[in-house]
Image: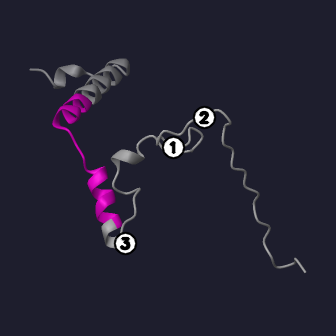
Amino acid sequence: MGLFKLRKNKSYSYTPRHWDDKGEGSPYQIKHKFDDFRKTTGETGSLKTKFNNALEDFNTSDEEVNRRLFIIIAILLFIFLFIIDFDLTLFFS
């Protein structure tokens, strides 16, 4: 009786007729673009090492990017204050 058994998904393995592998892998393999550059996608040991690897991937910061982001936010803030007719002479003497 199949009342309690889950139905198994059908799988289809397609290999093109005139395609030579040459060690590149399948062109139809679904793979994320940045998996080769991350530590968190590979096989890791414990939960602590997974967490530490995720923090290392997350905390890669660049000083130039931070400066550029600050400048963009400041410009957008001044444009917003100009649109709502805020008195900008408070910032300048």
Asked if residue 71 is positioned above or below residue 21 in the image, the reply reads above
Q: Which mark is residue 25?
A: 1
| Of 23 and 90, the residue lying toward us | 23
Asked if residue 39 is positioned above or below residue 73 in the image, the reply reads below
Q: Earlier in the sequence, mark 3 or mark 1?
A: 1
Dot 2, how many residues are within 10 Å of its Cα: few (below 14), some (14-19), or many (20+)?
few
User: In the image, what residue type sits under mark 1?
Assistant: Gly
Q: Which residue is mark 2?
A: 19
Asked if residue 45 is positioned above or below residue 11 in the image, the reply reads below
* Discs 3/2, front: 2
| Of 28 and 49, the residue lying toward us | 28
Q: Which residue is mark 3?
A: 47
Q: Earlier in the sequence, mark 3 or mark 2?
A: 2
Asked if residue 55 is positioned above or below residue 73 in the image, the reply reads below
Residue numbers of the magenta segment: 50-70
User: In the image, what residue type sits under mark 3?
Assistant: Leu
User: In the image, what residue type sits under mark 2?
Assistant: Trp
| Of 20 and 77, the residue lying toward us | 20
